[in-house]
Amino acid sequence: MRSRLLPLLIVLMAGVLLALGFPLAVSVAAAQQQKVVVDRIDDTARFASLAQFVTERPTGSRVKGGTDERRETLQKELDDYYDVYGIRAGVFYRDDGPMAHAPASWYLPPKGDVRGAFQEALRSRGSHDPEQVWPWQRGRLAVASPVIRDGDVIAVVVTDSPTGRMRSKTLHGWLLIAAGESAAMLLAVGAALRLTGWVLRPVRVLDATTHDIATGRLKSRVAAAGGPPELRRLARSFNEMADHVEDVLEQQRAFVADASHQLRNPLSALLLRIELLALELPEDNQEIGAVRTEGKRLAQVLDDLLGLALAEHAAADLSLTDIGELAAERVASWRPLADERGVRLTGDCPATTGWADPVALSSALDAVIDNALKFTPEGGPVHVTVSSSNGTTTVVVTDGGPGLTDDELARVGDRFWRSNRHQNVKGSGLGLSISRALLTAGGGSIAYARNEPHGLKVTVSVPRGEPSAAS
């Protein structure tokens, strides 16, 4: 969830910073240009005030040593202005003739921005704001002011300024903005990390606890954590729900255990009376035999129910166990019964370790092997294989029985469930349920699949690493 929430927050914050940064960058560029334009307007206004009193029109391009001292003063100011600032400037009459200009080679161009500013000033209006010059452009700024005498425009002062310095200042301002935006972005990412961690910490704790409960560790609870009040309230509600569920399950287990235990004594007394009654009947009486069989079957069901209740209630005593050795022992224990039934029971059990409760795993393997021997016909194989991969140790038990259909595979392991095709086989339908309960308590699992060409394949898995450390 964090990998999805964090990019969303970062994109939103980046969008906000860019939405603020772009207008600020445009504002910085416009401010720098406006500052230059205002300076040029002041300069042209000063030159216009000097040119206003020039009465003698020069006869050449630049007349030196003439009698009009005001024009000479104006020319000297323009020369100094060009030498100091490198800005071309000139005062031109309405017919484009120069009153004074610097440098000497510069004249009013026939077209372009300078000509446009000149024409604008001839109409007694100052220069309008020139088009924005960006740092990657190499344009120039043209500013013009009219020279007015007796209410008439007699000439125009024009300046043609380079923009390199202005563009450098604009770029410097942009770099400062970029640095500020980068710093703000880093702070925003840090804040987003802290915020997502604060918001999602209770969710991670809740997810881990839910996983623990789903895998059989019903004592797990959501630890107190920070986060928004809604998530803290959700954690408390989850703990209350888990307490209620555990109480209900505990009551169910207690009921099953108590019922099984309480029914055991009356059933034993009933079976004893049946045996006494059988003494007065012929030995080949079929009815009394059927009653004995059903009584023993009922006793087995009660024993299995009590075993299931204890298996679901007991906590696993996990330890690092040699699974290969344990499986080999169970194969050796069941081989006499297999030989008696004519079933070929074999094992491939190399030494490999896993974390399991040895007693619970032995009981689970006993149930699985017993089930395989029941349904494998005489002369059929039952094979036990131990292997390990991807952090899991597995014990695979395959048989040569009739196997199960897809629908039956979906239900195998349910309490009291037995295939309709195998109702005549001895059993209560609780053996595999007890195996699953024993394995789940220790972090293991049991799975069922078809064994080709026929039969059932049961896979018992336990973790190679300590479950508490892995979680």
Image (spheres, helix red, strand yellow):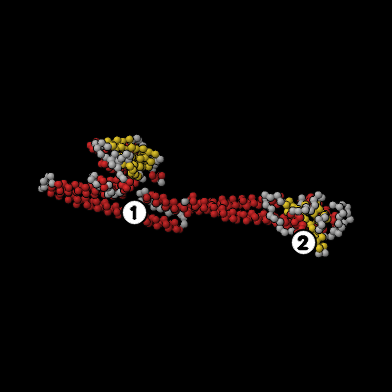
Q: Is residue 370 visible?
A: no
Say above or below: 412 vs 234: above
Q: Locate residue 156 relative to residue 306 in the image: left or right.
A: right
Residue at far bottom of view:
151
For residue 166, the mark is none
Q: Residue at x 73, y 54 (%)?
A: 141
First-in-chain label (2 vs 1):
2
Q: Position of residue 317 (x, y in %)?
A: 33, 44
Residue 194 position within the rendered picture, expressed as x and y whole percent measured from the top left: 51, 52
Q: Write down the residue under mark 1.
A: 246
Q: Residues within 10 Å of mark 1 (few under 14, many from 20)?
A: some
For residue 127, above or below residue 342: below
Residue located 78% across and 52% down the image: 109
Give yes or no for contact between labels 2 and 1 (Cβ–Cβ under 8 Å).
no
Residue at mark 2: 123
Quarter residue 118 falls in: bottom right
Q: Residue furthest right?
A: 67
Residue at image location 87% in from the left, 54% down from the top: 59
Q: CA distance from mark 2 to mark 1?
A: 94 Å
* Amino acid type, callout 2: Arg
* Image quadrant where residue 452 sits: top left
Query: Please, what is the three-letter code of the amino acid marked with disc 1?
Result: Glu
Q: Nearer the viewer, mark 2 or mark 1?
A: 2
The kind of secondary structure element at disc 2 is: loop
